[in-house]
Amino acid sequence: MLKIPLPLRLQLSLVIVVGAALLKHHAWSCLAVYGAIALIWVWLLRVPIPHLGGLLGTELIFLSLLALPLGWERASFLLVRSLVCLIVMNSFLLTLTPHSFGIALKSLPVPAAFKENLLLAGQYLEILLTEVTRMQRSAQLRGLNGAAGWLRYASAAMIGTLYLRSLDRAERVYAAMITRGYNGHLPIDPPLRPKQRFAVLAACAIAAGLTLTSYRI
């Protein structure tokens, strides 16, 4: 993976996504340029293709249910544009190290409370996934596998237990953070260097040019 600092990766990803999202409808040539940029972004970050493909497939199924009622011509452009945006943001998220998203957020001009909520939500999701993995392993060791009706009922009944276990662990993690001096502010605040600021400005200029061109075509 190319050594791109987290704040720079996040800002470049947002520039590409916002530029693609603001494209005029049916500006296929400009969208093709954004698609090429998204593929280059995947290559630069060395994204694991199987994970990216599985994530995109799930997301596109949901998006297709929302877009297809708008008509095939309009839905096709919306789906392709959404695909470009998802490729960029999923590439960024899949190459994050644990607990690093909050550090990247420090470079954005958003309220501190919003950053704190995102940081805690990310940690809660990580705890939730860990509990799901543990419960699945425990069920497999006890021979609970298959697709029987009673097993589906038992799996649904375990959702409440999963919620309680993950919530209890999240409270313990937060209490440990408070004990170690956490006050809602991340200890790392990496500013962008002049070259990195120039890269962001150049990306903004390219994205603005492509987006404005789409309205002139």
Image (cartoon, rainbow, N blue to C red):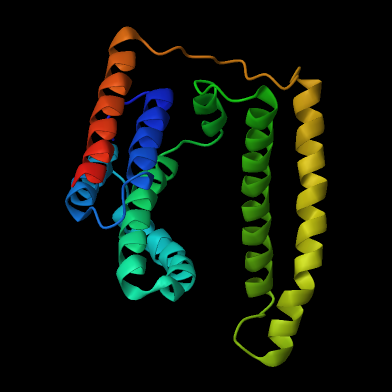
- Point out residue 199 in the picture as x, y percentages from the top left corner: 27, 20
Q: Give the residue at x 62% y 46%.
A: 126
- Point out residue 77 in the picture as x, y percentages from the top left corner: 31, 61
Looking at the image, is 45 positioned above or below residue 198?
A: below
- Point out residue 176 in the picture as x, y percentages from the top left corner: 78, 29
Looking at the image, is 116 positioned above or below residue 81?
A: above
Q: Give the residue at x 27% y 27%.
A: 203
Looking at the image, is 191 positioned above or below residue 33?
A: above
Looking at the image, is 185 positioned above or below residue 18?
A: above
Tell me if residue 200 can be seen.
yes
140 left or right, relative to 190? right
Question: Which of these two is toward me, 30 or 190?
Answer: 30
Question: Which of these two is toward me, 57 or 149?
Answer: 57
The residue sitting at the bottom extreme is 149
88 left or right, relative to 28? right
105 left or right, relative to 124? left
Tell me if residue 37 can be seen.
no
User: Is the N terminus in the top left, top right, bottom left or bottom right quadrant?
Assistant: top left
- Point out residue 20 in the picture as x, y percentages from the top left corner: 33, 45
The residue sitting at the front extreme is 216
Q: Give the residue at x 65% y 60%.
A: 132
